[in-house]
Amino acid sequence: MAAAMHRIEAATLTGGPVPDPPRVAWRKRMRQRVLDAARDLTCEAGWDQVSLSAVAARAEVSRPSVYKEFGNRAGLGRALVVLETRQFLTGVTDALYPGVPDSHDCLRMAILHVLQEADNQPLIRAVITAARKGSDSLLPYLTARADPIFDAGQILVQGWLATRYPQQRTESVELASDVIVRMTISHLILPADDQHLTAQRLATAALKLLTPP
């Protein structure tokens, strides 16, 4: 507590952020190296072939350090997908807020961003490609209902719908946001040929769930 207060006081006096203590700084660097290594190995061979020993060796850290930071292989996989999909949510937020005036077009652009980013991000592309072949166990972190990624996406869309359609019942907004997220994820795994048409249709279908004013 005293150390934290000292850092706050120092930041106030200097007018800028105070560097992390050496141990904290090392842990952050180590965590990023491990995530980078796990990402590279997954892109090369698929998550099913990635072991913690291989990740530790690639990151040049000890295996116990990896376990201490992430708990187990599942914890590492979860952290990896959360990190990679953060860009998805950032892009979706940029498309929705403030967004174009037409709500349908605004939602269409946000969905299209997600569909296109899946092709642009190597890890997400590797996970989805493997899932189409029925082999990659990272997929549940993208699609599981209880996962923070799913929840964060739904909360983001739900908040946007509530802003655009304040007269709607909460149940209608929740249903529409759930459908938007689920249908978008399903099209990542089993894509149609035309991403623009897919985004158009998903936006139309989801907004039809809202109760007419």
Image (cartoon, grey):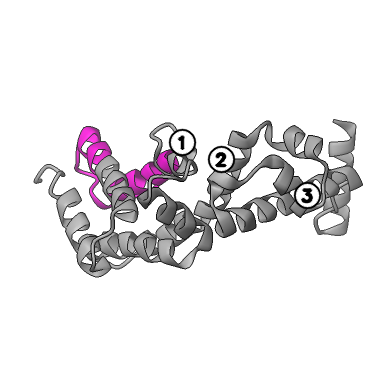
Q: Which numbered mark, 3 or 2, is in the foreground of this view?
A: 3
Label 3: how many Cα within 10 Å (few below 14, some 14–19, many 20+): some
Instruction: Examine the rendering and report whether any part of residue 192 can be seen.
Output: yes
Dominant SS of magenta comes to helix
Q: Are marks 2 and 1 in contact (CB under 8 Å)?
A: yes
Position of 11 compared to 94: left or right? Answer: right
Q: Which tag, 1 or 3, sits closer to the chain's start?
A: 3
Q: Amino acid at mark 3?
A: Ala
In reply to whether residue 172 is colored magenta, the answer given is yes
Q: Amino acid at mark 2?
A: Arg
Please report the residue visible at 80 percent of the width from the left and 38 percent of the height from the top.
65
Q: Which residue is mark 3?
A: 57
In reply to whether residue 85 is colored magenta, the answer given is no
Q: Which tag, 2 or 1, sits closer to the chain's start?
A: 2
Q: Which quadrant, please, contains the N terminus?
A: top right
Q: Which mark is residue 71?
A: none
Cα separation, mark 1 vs mark 3, equals: 29 Å
Q: Nearer the viewer, residue 63 or 49?
A: 49
Instruction: Examine the rendering and report whether any part of residue 98 can be seen.
Output: no
Q: Which mark is residue 78?
A: 2
Q: Which tag, 3 or 2, sits closer to the chain's start?
A: 3
What range is drawn magenta here?
A: 149-176
Position of residue 166 measured from the top left corner of the image (x, y, whole percent): 24, 45
Q: Are marks 3 and 2 in contact (CB under 8 Å)?
A: no
Secondary structure under tag 1 reads loop
Q: Which residue is mark 1?
A: 147
Q: Which numbered mark, 2 or 1, is in the foreground of this view?
A: 2
